[in-house]
Structure formats: C-alpha cells, structure tokens
C-alpha cells in the first residue's frame, strides 16, 4: 500500500535525505519500489537470469523514475554484439551504463574492451533523447570521456574528488551510490556493511589477517571497520545519515542513491 503524505514525510528515507534507492533483484521483489517513499529507483545488475521481466519493469517505470544498470560487456547489452535486452527495457526506463562487475560476467564477457562499448552505448542513449548515467567504478577516465551523469561509489576521498572536479570546471551532474544502514547499532552496522568495507584495499591492508568483519569483530579489527564503514557507507540514525547526505550535496553531489543494506523495509 502506498504511503500517505504524512507517512512519507516521517519515513526513514525522507529523514535520510536520499534522492533514490538502489535495489538488487535477487534480494527483493523489485515491484516493492513503487511503495517506497522515493521517486528515483536504480536496479542493480546481478546477471541476465535475475533481470526482472519486461512487464515488471514497465509497471515500475510507470510509477517511479526508473534506471536500469546495463553492463556494456554483457550479452544482451553489448552495443558491438548482442544488444537484444535493450529492446526489452520500457521507454520510460533510463539506463545506467557500467563496465560490469566481473562476478556477473562470463570469461568471454570480461575480455571485451570497455572503452568503445561505453562510448557507443552512451551515444545510443543520447540518440534516443536520454541522458546516460555512467558508472565510474574502475573506469573513471573512460566514464568522464563518455559523458553523462557520473555515477560514483562513496569512498573516503569522495568529497575531495568532487571538489576537485567542480574546481576544474566540470558542470555536469554527479550521482553517488552508497550502501545505507540507518541505525546507530554498531553490531547491526558491521553485520550489514563490514565485509563490504573490508574489500576496499586500504581497509583490507589495515585489518589483522583472518579478522572477522561483522559484529564478531573485536580489538584492532573492530576499530578499523568502525571507521571504514563510515567512509564507504552511509550509517547512523536517519538524522545522522541525512546530515552526511547534506554535506555531500554541499560540495557538489547532485543525486545520492542508497542501497538498503539491511533490506528495503529499513527505509519505510
């Protein structure tokens, strides 16, 4: 059931100041996005077999501003090969162009060159009258060359990087993706995003070998992770998250999209 105006204003999502949410099709029925108190929804790509069907996407695009992540190296979205899945996306859905996470690509797909495909896909989106969002993870220079809305992951250098881009004269839109855990329960935070932060190189190098990355983390490992999750995710009570989002927008971020790391119900 859609939230009422008063419920929306008091929702966790509203208090966090998030512009949108990112959902993973393997974790939830993406149709629930129509009942979330946000207008912008980005669907992550987790493999062709987990793509929502065309009818589901069309229904969702009719009620929210929908963006679908499309890896330009993956069969079905490859502008220099099989791009058959592009035709299944509803006209109302926009695309997020990414190189593609290796975990969701075949060996052959991982070998394909990113640069020409990213450029071709961005041109296709523009020819259709749209503005591509371009995922920058691991391909920052290529993403800038492709143009469109730059879609980056939150990191400990985000604010410095955004200031530098703006100071250099970049006047395009900047979007940010970040896991969000709207609670100040430290054990819950570490269980939700401790492992995520631990995969980042500086965190991985600072952690004791074999250390737990969830609520069981102790001593030096817990100290490292407690600091790291605040660099790479939006954590804390909703008002604390909201303040962080305001700070990010103050330095030049235009759109903040949160991935609900503890489930979509946490944002209601």
Image (cartoon, rainbow, N blue to C red):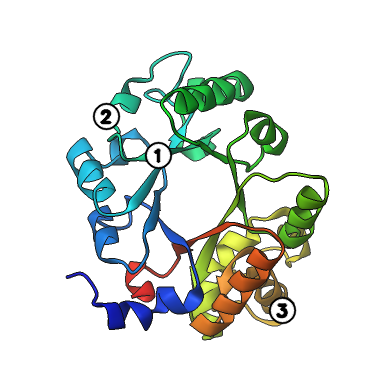
Q: Closer to the N terminus: mark 1 or mark 3?
A: 1
- Frontmost of labels 1 and 3 is 1
Relative height, residue 177 to residue 229 (above, below): above
Q: Please rate how many residues cluster around mark 3, counting C-alpha atoms within 10 Å: few if below 14, some from 14 to 19, many from 20.
A: few
Q: CA distance from mark 2 to mark 3?
A: 47 Å
Element marked by disc 2 = helix
Q: Nearer the viewer, residue 217 or 143?
A: 143
Q: CA distance from mark 2 to mark 1?
A: 12 Å
Residue identifier under label 2? 88
Residue 52 located left or right of residue 132: left
Q: Closer to the N terminus: mark 2 or mark 3?
A: 2
Q: Please rate how many residues cluster around mark 2, counting C-alpha atoms within 10 Å: few if below 14, some from 14 to 19, many from 20.
A: some
Percent x, y of residue 59: 20, 47
Residue at figure coordinates x 25%, y 50% from the top left: 60
Q: Closer to the N terminus: mark 2 or mark 1?
A: 2
Residue at figure coordinates x 58%, y 23% from the top left: 119
């Amino acid at each position: 059931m859609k939230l009422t105006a008063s419920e929306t204003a008091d929702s966790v999502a509203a208090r966090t100041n998030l512009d949108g949410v990112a959902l993973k099709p393997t974790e939830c029925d993406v149709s629930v996005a129509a009942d979330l108190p946000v207008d912008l929804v980005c669907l992550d790509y987790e493999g062709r077999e987990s793509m929502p069907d065309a009818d589901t996407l069309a229904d969702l695009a009719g009620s929210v501003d929908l963006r679908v992540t499309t890896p330009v190296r993956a069969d079905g979205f490859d502008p220099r090969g099989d791009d058959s899945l592009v035709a299944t996306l509803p006209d109302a859905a926009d695309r997020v162009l990414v190189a593609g996470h290796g975990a969701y690509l075949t060996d052959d797909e991982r070998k394909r060159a990113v640069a020409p495909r990213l450029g071709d896909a961005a041109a296709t989106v523009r020819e259709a009258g749209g503005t591509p969002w371009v995922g920058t993870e691991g391909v920052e220079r290529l993403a800038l060359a492709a143009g469109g809305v730059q879609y980056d992951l939150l990191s400990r250098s985000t604010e410095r990087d955004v200031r530098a881009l703006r100071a250099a004269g970049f006047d395009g839109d900047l979007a940010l993706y970040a896991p969000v855990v709207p609670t100040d329960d430290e054990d819950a935070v570490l269980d939700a995003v401790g492992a995520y932060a631990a995969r980042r190189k500086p965190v991985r190098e600072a952690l004791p070998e074999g250390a737990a990355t969830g609520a069981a983390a102790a001593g030096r490992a817990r100290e490292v992770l407690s600091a790291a999750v605040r660099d790479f995710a939006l954590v804390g009570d909703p008002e604390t998250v909201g303040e962080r989002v305001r700070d990010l927008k103050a330095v030049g971020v235009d759109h903040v999209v949160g991935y609900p790391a503890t489930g979509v119900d946490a944002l209601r």
